[in-house]
Image (cartoon, grey):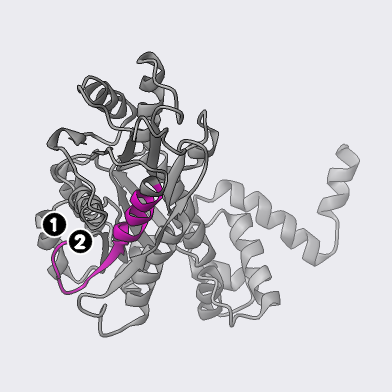
């Protein structure tokens, strides 16, 4: 082994230079390395190094590989904050979600990160637990880090906090916004279509006593869902007793409590439409404790179509809201701002479609129960 190491030191000039670079790189602090040093070692201009590091597609592939070889050998890491100060771009998007314990949001985060990676962007993630104060702090921290845009995927949280940041020339995209603000794009979920399909499906199965379990009262999206439910029931001339509208919190526990409340009524509903899948899963879980058979005695419909919905027992009928499509629309809205020197079009709106997905938690109501 010692002889081989000695031979390596006696190789031609090019190999000797390669060995010496590796030795020096171990002794050199990464902070001491800059693109001038990389350009010198790679035998290219600093402009070529900059374009290669930023993965500009017009760089000659041979030169790019040469640059990245030196970058890897020296352990160089670009100073993104310095780059952002010079170029005005950090190539970082901020992503704010309310709850990482709800499976719908990790799916959105995963999709958003994948799309960002494909476009050479990084993602700065924060979770707010539906707390406006935490959301305001998360937005402030992201603005301080000079993100190129903010995707706030909190499904209709009140917008007073967002309004304070809108004039800061940071492009923002929100979901289910109720107000129109310049520099803010809105993704509107078409709740009406999916909920109408769900109610019409239940009505076609002879259900007339249909309950609705809502979500947290501070979300605009919850109000929109409930209104859509009430409108569709009225269209079909189906009565909605006040006790058939039950508050929830978008958790399994909230669904369990809602089912207990509805099961205690003198006249029970024969079907329940839930504002999200986690609530519906809680309803399924609690139904067994009350001796209620799904779907023979109670039909249940969720909303979101999270991956778990296919694996409940029985598999959950639900309204699909594509997490991948939501992430794509959010990224597209932010990217459009980056490409538009005049700023994001005022009040720009994107629409996210919904569609009923039939599985096994709904069935025809027996005539005596209708």
The residue beneath circle 2 is 177
**Residue 323 sits above or below residue 205 on the image:** below
Q: Is residue 185 above or below residue 112?
A: below
Q: CA distance from mark 1 to mark 2?
A: 7 Å
Mark 1 in CB contact with mark 2 (< 8 angstroms): yes
Relative to 160, residue 272 above or below: above
Q: Residue visible at 74% across and 55% down?
A: 19
- The correct choice, above or below, for 314 with respect to 184 in the image is above
Residue at image x 20%, y 61%?
A: 177
Residue drawn at the location 46% of the way across and 42% of the way down: 317
Q: Is residue 187 inside the magenta stretch?
A: yes
Q: Which residues are magenta?
A: 177-201
Q: Is disc 1 surrounded by few (<14), some (14 to 19) or many (20+) residues within 10 Å?
A: some
Q: Residues within 10 Å of mark 2 (few under 14, many from 20)?
A: many
Nearer the observer, 96 or 176? 176
- Would residue 15 be counted in the magenta stretch? no
Q: Which residue is mark 1?
A: 159
């Amino acid at each position: 082994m010692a002889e081989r190491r000695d031979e390596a030191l006696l190789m031609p000039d090019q190999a000797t230079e390669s060995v010496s670079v590796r030795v020096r790189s171990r002794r050199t602090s990464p902070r001491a390395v800059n693109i001038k040093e990389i350009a010198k070692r790679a035998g290219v201009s600093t402009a070529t190094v900059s374009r290669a590091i930023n993965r500009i597609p017009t760089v000659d592939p041979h030169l790019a590989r040469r640059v990245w070889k030196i970058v890897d050998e020296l352990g160089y890491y670009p100073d993104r904050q310095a780059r952002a100060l010079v170029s005005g771009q950090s190539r970082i998007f901020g992503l704010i979600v309310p709850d990482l314990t709800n499976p719908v949001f990790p799916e959105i985060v995963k999709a958003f990160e994948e799309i960002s990676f494909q476009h050479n962007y990084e993602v700065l993630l924060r979770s707010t637990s539906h707390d406006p104060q935490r959301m305001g702090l998360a937005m402030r921290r992201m603005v301080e880090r000079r993100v190129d845009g903010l995707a706030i995927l909190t499904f209709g949280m009140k917008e007073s906090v967002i309004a304070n940041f809108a004039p800061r020339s940071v492009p923002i995209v929100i979901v289910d916004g109720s107000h129109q603000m310049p520099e803010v794009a809105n993704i509107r979920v078409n709740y009406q279509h999916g909920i109408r399909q769900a109610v019409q499906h239940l009505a076609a199965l002879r259900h007339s006593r249909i309950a609705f379990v809502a979500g947290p009262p501070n979300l605009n999206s919850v109000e929109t869902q409930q209104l859509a439910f009430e409108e569709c029931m009225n269209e079909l001339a189906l009565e909605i007793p006040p006790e058939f509208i039950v508050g929830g919190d978008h958790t399994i526990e909230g669904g369990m409590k809602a089912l207990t409340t509805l099961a205690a009524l003198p006249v029970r509903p024969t079907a329940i439409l839930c504002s999200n899948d986690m609530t519906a899963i809680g309803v399924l879980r609690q139904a067994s404790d009350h001796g209620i058979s799904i779907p023979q005695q109670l039909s249940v419909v969720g909303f979101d179509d999270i991956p778990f919905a296919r694996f409940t027992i029985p598999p959950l009928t639900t309204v699909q809201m594509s997490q991948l499509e939501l992430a794509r629309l959010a990224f597209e809205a932010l990217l459009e701002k980056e490409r538009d020197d005049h700023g994001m079009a005022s009040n720009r709106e994107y629409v996210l479609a919904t569609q009923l997905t039939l599985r096994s938690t709904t069935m025809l109501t027996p005539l005596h129960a209708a």
